[in-house]
Structures are given as structure tokens and as C-alpha cells.
């Protein structure tokens, strides 16, 4: 059996431009393998080293000797069995990455997920996204953050995580491949799916869940719950179409509602469940022509073999960290408000990353002292601080989904922009002095941060670089506490805070992994094991 062979790997390093040249990689692999006659081989891991010119490709090769068989890249056959009629029911609130992976984990363990999602199916969501851009109308239940697939769907689909549990990451990625993602995500050091590919993958995941017997309730907003003997017994939902209420009988509830469900945080607070204000980060999106970023990062080297370049920047300004966030090469700045009367930006890229712009969040850490100084207190203080900046941006740019913007150089030099360069933000941008919109400590930390970044990346302070504000939904401004062992809320048995909204994840992959982990804990409790 191929899988029983010891795993034979070698590392190969060669100029990136040579990788696709006929025979070059094969020659490099032959040279690197010295243990016996080379049989089949394939690339198991791939990354670029762009520290110097020429840009080098670093590849991990999995090979076998002649006469042996190379096992497949993916694990054979994922399987989600049909649930029995009497399977216990667990509510999963929110159908983002955390909710989807939690639901799949429940099915794997014979539990029926009752999925509650305030938005609609993933394709239907598109109409509402177009309305944001064209008509400046934000549907509070269907937008870039809400709806099937969650915030992760019309996002970038970068699948990085700081988690080091390689086995878990691999199996989470394999679930995506099983549902149609390109197997290259199993190989790339910085895997990326792309906004155009994600919806079909999400639809297939939904099909898997429904075939297994999961319930999916679209357009239902979770608004309350009831308890029996002190533990969760039902979840109450309200139809976003006609306001009708429904009660779903369940054994427990996994709350994976994301970082933007402010009504959920308010409900938990109102019902007396402990929640905590949580530090997060806030700033702007900066956009450069992609060609400038490529030139800087690849030291002038150009060619089809090089993907659109990205960057990662971080520095400290006084008490505050300033860092790049969710950099989108070849991307678009997206209008990510979840309610009227606010402006929020974020970024995404299509799978080919072939838009002419590179955008990235550049954000400043916001802590307790900051929101207190701004006059906000209590568990919702960080969220209210965040909302106040989003509203200020909406007011400053004319009370539509147009966003306030300023040329990077003008921002650094504290002068107004009289004109703005072309920008990918489709609702439009309006010249505004961002020092008047952002809280002064954020504007000043950003200004100093940009000067530092300009010294590190020569050319970064480019005359055609533009700032669009605000980038505010970097992570949840609220933490919903949970017990370290059982993963339940300490005050409410059967209530499982999960994913980014609860403060336990930051990004698609980490939210997915947290969904699996929380569902496994819920299964353990139900089965008494
Ligand atoms: C434009 C954009 C680009 C991004 N790019 C990337 C990227 O490239 N890589 C990356 O790792 N991360 C990216 N992110 C962040 C990523 O999308 C989130 O970290 C991730 O989706 C969090 O997953 P989650 O399941 O915890 O929550 P979410 O994805 O936010 O899902 C929460 C779900 O809960 C639903 N919900 C909320 N309230 C209720 C309620 N009361 N009742 C019923 N349902 C409710 C929402 O409709 C939503 O579907 C991006 C985000 C955005 C907005």
C-alpha cells in the first residue's frame, strides 16, 4: 500500500522563473534525490522567497522510488453519513465558516445541526451587494458580512492562520477541496481561493449538510432563547421577511454569529449573560497600483511566473501597534457596512488577483484606555467606539456608501487632497481630511506608521496611493467568555460561543477550526463521554 511507505521528501530551491520551464524542476528533483532511482514525485508545499533578486521558489517534493506508488495528495473520501430520524438536535446560529464547520462536525458525530441564518442563500446575497454599490442601500440582514457563507464568502478567501495545528489545518483545507476548491490550496504556503470561487464551494457544503439531514433555516434571525433546568432548551428566531417568530427545540446552541452582529451582543447583554469589551484594531484601507507593489517587492523583476506581490508591515508607535491587515493583491476595496448610516471598508481579490490595484488594511490597536478616554464604558464600549467612527465616516462623506478618502502623501503631510486617484471602491470616494474623521490617536499613529513603512518599503509613499476609511471590522470588539474545558458559557450550560464573533478566531480558517472544536465539545457533552 502506497500510504504505508515512509514519506520521502526533499526540498528544492530554484529561481521562480525556472519552475515552469520544461525539465528544470525534474532536473532539480533528480539532483536532490540521492537515495535510489527516482520514481513518481509531486510538489507538496510551495512558497516564494522574494528577499533578493532573483525571486526563488522553495518547494517540498514528495517522491517514491521506481516501482513504488505515490499516494494521493488528498485523503481518500470524506464522508458525512445520513443522520437517523431520532438524532439529537443542536442549533448552529450563523452559517459562516465557524457555523459551517461546526455543522459538518456535528453530522460526522450523528448530531443534527439546526442551522439558523439571518441572510439568504449565497447566490441571492449578490443582489443585495449590488444594491449597496449602486443604490447605497444596506440590508441589515444581507450584506458583505451577513448571509450564507458569512463574512468569509464575498471576501478574499486567503486561508492563512496563525494556528500551528497542522493536522487540523490540513483536514479543514481538505474539506474545502472535497467541495470544489483547487487542490493547490493544500500545497501553497499562502493558500487563496478567491471571491469568485467561494460561493460554489459554500453551496456544495450546504448540499452535503442537507443530504445528511441537517436543517437549514434562511432568513431567520436569532432573537432569544429559553432554558429548562438552567440549560438551553429552545432558540427563538424571527423571520426577516414577515417578523413571525419560531421556536426550535434543541439540546444546545452554538453561537457563531461573527464580529458584526451587534444586535446579538446587545441581546446577550440585555439577558444578563457576561460579555466583555475586547481590544481590536481600527484604521484605513490603503490602495496602490499593483504594479508599484510588484516593482518594490520583486526588486524590479517582472514576469508571468511571479504572482501579484503582497506585503506585511508592522511597527510600534508609542503605546499602539500599527500593522497591515488582510492585504489583497490584485483586489478591490469592498463596502462592508452591516447597517444604514455607517461606512465600513474591507478588501477582497478574485482568484486570479488580476485587478490593477493592491489594497491593505493599515490599522492601529485599540485598547481599554482608548475607548475609555473617548467616553465609552462597559462590555459594549469597544463596539460603540467602533460604531462611532463608522458613523463619523458616513457623515463626513455625504451620508451614502461613498467613503471618505485622502491621498496617502497628503495624509502624511496633513494637507487636504484636492483630487483623488482612481480607486477600486465602487460606491465612490470623496476627498475628506481623514485627520478630522478618525480619532486623533489613530490618525497620528497611522501617520507615523506610514512614515516608517515608507522608509522600509521604498516607494510605498507613492503619490497615487490613496487611503479609504474606515477599516474597522478587523476582529470582534466583544468577547463572549467560555469555560476552557467544556467550551460552554460559564453561566449557561448548553450555550457555546464560537468563532470570530465570540472572540476565538480571526479569519476564515481559524473560525472554521474553532467551529470544529466547539462542535466536538458539544458532542462530547451530549454523548456523556
Ligand atoms: C470583505 C472581507 C474580506 C475578508 N477576507 C478574508 C480573507 O481573505 N481571509 C480570511 O481568513 N478572512 C477574511 N475575512 C474575515 C473572515 O471573513 C472572517 O474572519 C470569518 O468569516 C469569520 O467567520 P465566522 O464564522 O466566525 O463569522 P462570520 O463569517 O461573520 O459569519 C457569521 C454568520 O452569522 C450570521 N448571523 C449573524 N447574526 C445572526 C443572527 N442573529 N441570527 C442568525 N444568523 C446570524 C451572519 O449572517 C453570518 O452568516 C474577510 C472579511 C471580509 C468582510
Image: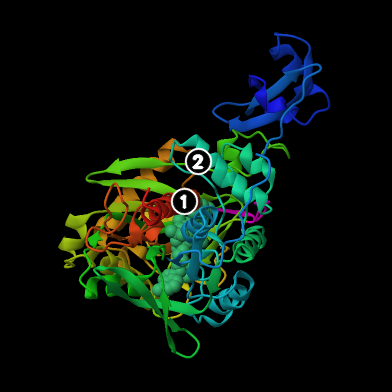
Q: Crowding at label 1, few (<14), some or many (≥20) Cα neighbours within 10 Å?
A: many
- Does the Cβ of the disc 1 residue fall within 8 Å of ligand 1? no
Q: Position of residue 87 (x, y in %)?
A: 50, 64
Q: How many marks?
A: 2
Of 242 and 506, nearer the camera is 242
Name the side, left or right, on which 431 lies relative to 194: left
Name the side, left or right, on which 218 lies relative to 524: right
Q: Position of residue 256 (x, y in %)?
A: 41, 62
Q: Which residues are magenta?
A: 350-358
Q: Is residue 303 visible?
A: yes
**Which coloring applies here?**
rainbow
Q: Is residue 320 rendered magenta in the image? A: no
Quadrant containing the N terminus is top right
> Tag 1's secondary structure?
helix
Residue 500 found in image quarter = bottom left
Q: Is residue 269 above or below residue 292?
A: below
Of 129 and 467, nearer the camera is 129
Disc 1 designates what residue? 516
Q: Position of residue 100 (x, y in %)?
A: 52, 59
Q: Position of residue 473 (x, y in %)?
A: 39, 61
Residue found farthest to the right: 22
Q: Residue at x 48, y 56 (%)?
A: 102
Disc 2 designates what residue? 168
Q: Mark 1 and mark 2 in contact (Cβ < 8 Å)? A: yes
Amino acid at each position: 500500500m502506497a500510504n504505508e511507505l515512509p514519506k520521502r521528501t526533499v526540498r528544492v530551491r530554484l529561481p521562480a522563473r525556472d519552475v515552469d520551464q520544461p525539465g528544470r524542476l525534474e532536473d532539480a528533483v533528480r539532483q536532490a534525490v540521492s537515495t535510489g532511482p527516482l520514481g513518481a514525485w509531486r510538489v507538496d508545499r510551495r512558497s516564494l522567497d522574494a528577499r533578493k533578486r532573483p525571486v526563488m521558489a522553495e518547494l517540498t517534493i514528495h517522491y517514491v522510488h521506481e516501482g513504488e506508488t505515490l499516494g494521493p495528495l488528498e485523503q481518500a473520501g470524506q464522508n458525512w453519513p445520513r443522520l437517523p430520524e431520532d438524532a439529537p438536535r443542536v442549533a448552529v446560529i450563523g452559517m459562516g465558516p465557524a457555523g459551517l464547520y461546526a455543522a459538518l462536525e456535528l453530522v460526522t458525530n450523528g448530531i443534527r445541526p439546526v442551522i439558523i441564518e439571518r441572510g439568504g442563500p449565497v447566490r441571492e446575497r449578490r443582489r443585495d451587494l449590488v444594491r449597496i454599490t449602486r443604490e447605497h442601500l444596506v440590508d441589515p440582514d444581507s450584506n458583505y458580512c451577513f448571509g450564507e457563507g458569512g463574512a468569509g464568502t464575498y471576501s478574499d478567501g486567503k486561508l492563512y492562520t496563525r494556528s500551528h495545528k497542522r493536522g487540523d489545518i490540513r483536514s479543514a483545507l481538505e474539506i474545502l477541496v472535497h467541495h470544489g476548491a483547487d487542490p493547490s490550496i493544500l500545497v501553497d504556503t499562502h493558500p487563496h481561493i478567491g471571491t469568485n470561487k467561494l460561493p460554489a464551494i459554500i453551496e456544495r457544503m450546504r448540499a452535503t449538510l442537507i443530504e445528511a439531514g441537517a436543517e437549514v433555516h434562511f432568513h431567520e434571525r436569532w432573537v432569544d432563547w429559553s432554558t429548562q433546568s438552567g440549560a438551553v432548551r429552545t432558540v427563538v428566531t424571527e423571520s426577516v421577511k414577515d417578523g413571525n417568530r419560531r421556536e426550535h427545540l434543541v439540546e444546545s446552541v452554538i453561537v457563531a454569529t461573527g464580529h458584526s452582529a451587534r444586535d446579538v451582543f446587545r441581546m446577550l447583554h440585555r439577558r444578563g449573560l457576561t460579555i466583555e469589551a475586547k481590544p481590536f484594531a481600527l484604521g484605513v484601507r490603503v490602495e496602490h497600483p499593483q504594479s508599484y507593489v510588484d516593482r518594490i517587492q520583486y526588486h524590479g523583476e517582472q514576469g508571468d511566473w511571479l504572482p501579484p506581490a503582497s506585503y506585511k508591515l508592522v511597527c510600534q508607535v508609542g503605546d499602539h501597534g500599527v500593522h497591515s491587515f488582510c492585504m489583497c493583491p490584485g483586489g478591490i476595496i469592498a463596502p462592508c457596512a452591516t447597517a444604514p448610516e455607517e461606512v465600513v471598508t474591507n478588501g477582497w481579490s478574485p482568484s486570479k488577483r488580476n485587478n490593477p490595484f493592491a489594497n491593505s488594511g493599515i490599522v492601529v490597536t485599540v485598547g481599554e484606555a482608548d475607548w475609555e478616554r473617548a467616553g465609552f464604558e462597559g462590555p459594549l464600549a469597544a463596539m460603540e467606539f467602533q460604531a462611532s467612527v463608522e458613523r463619523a465616516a458616513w457623515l463626513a462623506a455625504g451620508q451614502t456608501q461613498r467613503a471618505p478618502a485622502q491621498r496617502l502623501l497628503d495624509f502624511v503631510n496633513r494637507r487636504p487632497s484636492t483630487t483623488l486617484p482612481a480607486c477600486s471602491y465602487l460606491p465612490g470616494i470623496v476627498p475628506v481630511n481623514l485627520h478630522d474623521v478618525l480619532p486623533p490617536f489613530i490618525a497620528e499613529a497611522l501617520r507615523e506608521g506610514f512614515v516608517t513603512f515608507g522608509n522600509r518599503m521604498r516607494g510605498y509613499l507613492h503619490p497615487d496611493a490613496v487611503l479609504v476609511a474606515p477599516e474597522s471590522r478587523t476582529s470582534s470588539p466583544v468577547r463572549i467568555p467560555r469555560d476552557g474545558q467544556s467550551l460552554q458559557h460559564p453561566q449557561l450550560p448548553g450555550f457555546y460561543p464560537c468563532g470570530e464573533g465570540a472572540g476565538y478566531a480571526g479569519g476564515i480558517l481559524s473560525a472554521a477550526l474553532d467551529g470544529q472544536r466547539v462542535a466536538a465539545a458539544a458532542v462530547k457533552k451530549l454523548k456523556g463521554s
